[in-house]
Image: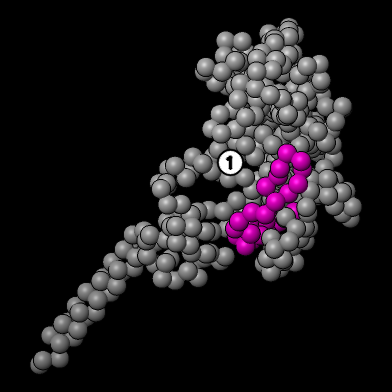
């Protein structure tokens, strides 16, 4: 006579226990920890993020891809069981958001690094084309003018600098080169395109300040004829991929019909430098089914091979080396 109530009591306890476990699991999954988790993200085509004036599209089945890493606060469950995701890595907050910054400030810094990386990539690509660069992409566009500097009221946002003291300008790097070694107080003649007309504007220079004696006129420059969209991605690691895509759109057959993922910070001299998150980025390149993955030579390349699982890893030290490596890949059949 006591068996039925006992069964009901036991079933009730089991149900309550099950609901408690479910609530605990949901809480562990939704409540963020103090740590961050790095996750792979499939490689993305670069082309939608770059617009080059007079671009020449090559329909050969190839393409340049960039790789990124999904970074967010890890849940308590992910913190306890990091192996819930393939390629996941848990990092303390101090390694993701430096002391003295909040998350929003760090994201802004990442966005600034991405913008600088894009402009450097554009300059490197235009220099690789050389004298054959199409007129719309030759020159340095004035992106902004600093108040109180010599350029204020003289140069305007949108002006395209095509020469400095008569020396041709193909990219912002040429302006930097032309200004190098000048003393504050010296005068510089900027030849600019504005509203369909060309004019020469002479400006005095001042010291950059903050302890630097470098001569400046107070402008921020972008590459002419090249526009970017960030798509929420930050950091400098897509520089190599952007440079390859820009050169492709300038008419150079860069990928030779292959799907190529690339990562690496690119410097104005064309050298390629190490990046973080190589494990996640290699997994992301694999997930996109690319034919090869260009990575900075050295430790990045050694680490990428650990997670390649058959993906072709090509280590490079410079932009020119990357172009040579792609040119010597087996032809697509």
**Does residue 280 sit above or below 170 in this rendering?**
below
Q: Residue at x 25, y 71 (%)?
A: 20
Tell me: 114 left or right of 130: left
Task: Say if 279 sits above or below 20 in the image.
Answer: above
Q: Position of residue 125 (x, y in %)?
A: 77, 36
Q: Residue furthest left?
A: 1
Residue 146 appears in which quarter of the rendering? top right
Considering the numbered disc 1 on the image, is that residue within a helix, a strand or a loop?
A: helix
Q: Residue at x 62, y 62 (%)?
A: 279
Q: Closest to the observer: 237 or 11?
A: 237
Q: Which residue is mark 1?
A: 113
Is 220 placed above or below 165 here?
below
**Could one spot residue 326 in this view of the protein?**
no
- Indicate yes or no whether the magenta region holds residue 34: no
Please provide the residue range marked out in magenta: 265-294
Q: Nearer the viewer, residue 10 or 325?
A: 325
Foreground residue among 326 and 317:
317
| 238 or 157, nearer to the observer | 157
Q: Position of residue 302 (x, y in %)?
A: 72, 66
Q: How is colour applied across the structure in the image?
A: one colour
Residue 244 vertical placement versus 10 (above, below): above
Q: Does residue 26 appear to the left or right of 205 in the view shown?
A: left
**Residue 27 position in % (x across, y down):** 31, 63
Residue 47 location, x and y as percent?
A: 69, 38
């Amino acid at each position: 006579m006591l068996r039925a109530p006992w069964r009901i009591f036991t079933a009730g306890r089991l149900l309550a226990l099950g609901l408690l476990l479910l609530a605990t699991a949901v809480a562990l999954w939704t409540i963020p920890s103090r740590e961050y988790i790095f996750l792979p993200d499939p490689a993305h085509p670069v082309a939608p993020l770059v617009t080059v004036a007079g671009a020449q599209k090559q329909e050969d089945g190839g393409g340049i891809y960039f790789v990124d890493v999904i970074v967010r606060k890890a849940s308590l469950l992910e913190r306890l069981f990091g192996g819930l995701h393939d390629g996941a890595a848990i990092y303390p907050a101090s390694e993701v958001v430096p002391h003295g910054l909040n998350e929003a400030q760090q994201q802004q810094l990442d966005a600034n690094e991405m913008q600088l990386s894009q402009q450097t990539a554009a300059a490197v690509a235009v220099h690789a084309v050389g004298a054959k660069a199409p007129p719309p992409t030759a020159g340095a566009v004035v992106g902004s003018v600093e108040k109180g500097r010599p350029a204020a009221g003289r140069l305007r946002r949108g002006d395209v600098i095509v020469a400095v003291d008569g020396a041709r300008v193909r990219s912002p790097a040429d302006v930097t080169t032309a200004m190098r070694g000048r003393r504050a107080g010296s005068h510089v003649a900027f030849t600019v395109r504005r509203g369909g007309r060309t004019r020469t504007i002479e400006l005095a220079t001042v010291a950059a300040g903050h302890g630097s004696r470098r001569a400046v006129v107070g402008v921020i420059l972008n590459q002419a004829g090249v526009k970017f969209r960030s798509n929420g991605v930050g950091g400098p690691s897509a520089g190599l991929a952007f440079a390859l895509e820009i050169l492709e759109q300038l008419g150079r057959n860069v990928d030779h019909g292959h799907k190529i993922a690339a990562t690496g910070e690119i410097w104005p001299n064309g050298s390629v430098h190490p990046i973080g998150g190589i494990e996640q980025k290699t997994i992301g390149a694999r997930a996109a089914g690319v034919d090869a993955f260009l990575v900075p030579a050295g430790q990045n390349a050694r680490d990428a091979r650990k997670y390649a699982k058959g993906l072709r890893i090509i280590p490079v030290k410079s932009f020119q080396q990357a172009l040579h490596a792609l040119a010597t890949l087996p032809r697509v059949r």
